[in-house]
Image (spheres, rainbow, N blue to C red):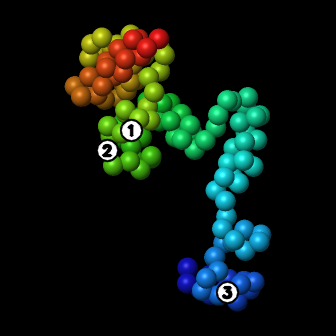
Amino acid sequence: MVPDLLAWKLICPDSSPEAFIFPNREGGVRDPNNYRKRVLGKLREKLNLPKLTFQVIRRTFATFSQTKGTVKDTQGVLRQVRSATTVDVYMQVLPEGCQANDRLDAQRTLQWPARTVTNQEAEIAIRRCAHKREHN
């Protein structure tokens, strides 16, 4: 990486210590909202979505990953320290899964046929389904 930065410094319009390595066109700070507006905004309109942010993308990924792997798999991809954060914040209950009332139903709700659901995961799924029923 050092050789690349040295090469960049040679052709960079402003190589002073105060300059940004990857400036915007005017030499200032890049605006992270620019990408959201240019790319995610166009995609949101094309898909006719009310909202599209990185948070929405993360939650969508976490929710649909319930059918593809374990909570630990999803937690690793999202780079989260606690699996409870993955389950409680990012994973949404799939509508067809809101019938859970025991351990077997919780396993079907989480759609993890390749392994046995732990008691803690089953309890979380049951609580989430009950919460969803109360608020619908």
Side of 44 where 87 appears, left or right: left
Categorize mark 1 by other alpha carbons within 10 Å: few (<14), some (14-19), many (20+).
Answer: many
Q: Position of residue 56 (x, y in %)?
A: 56, 37
For label 1, the residue is 86
* Amino acid on which disc 3 is placed: Ser
Numbered mark located on residue 82 in the image = 2
Q: Position of residue 111 (x, y in %)?
A: 40, 23
Of label 1 and label 3, which has the lower sequence position? Answer: 3
Question: Are the two marked residues, 2 and 1, in contact with CB atoms closer than 8 angstroms?
Answer: yes
Numbered mark located on residue 15 in the image = 3
Which of these two is toward me, 39 or 17? Answer: 17
Side of 66 where 39 appears, left or right: right
Residue at the spot 71% in from the left edge and 84% down from the top edge: 14
Q: Is residue 55 above or below residue 121?
A: below
Rendered image quadrant of residue 84: top left
* Amino acid on which disc 2 is placed: Arg
Categorize mark 3 by other alpha carbons within 10 Å: few (<14), some (14-19), many (20+).
Answer: some
Rendered image quadrant of residue 4: bottom right
Residue at the spot 69% in from the left edge and 44% down from the top edge: 40
| Alpha carbon distance from label 3 to label 2 | 42 Å
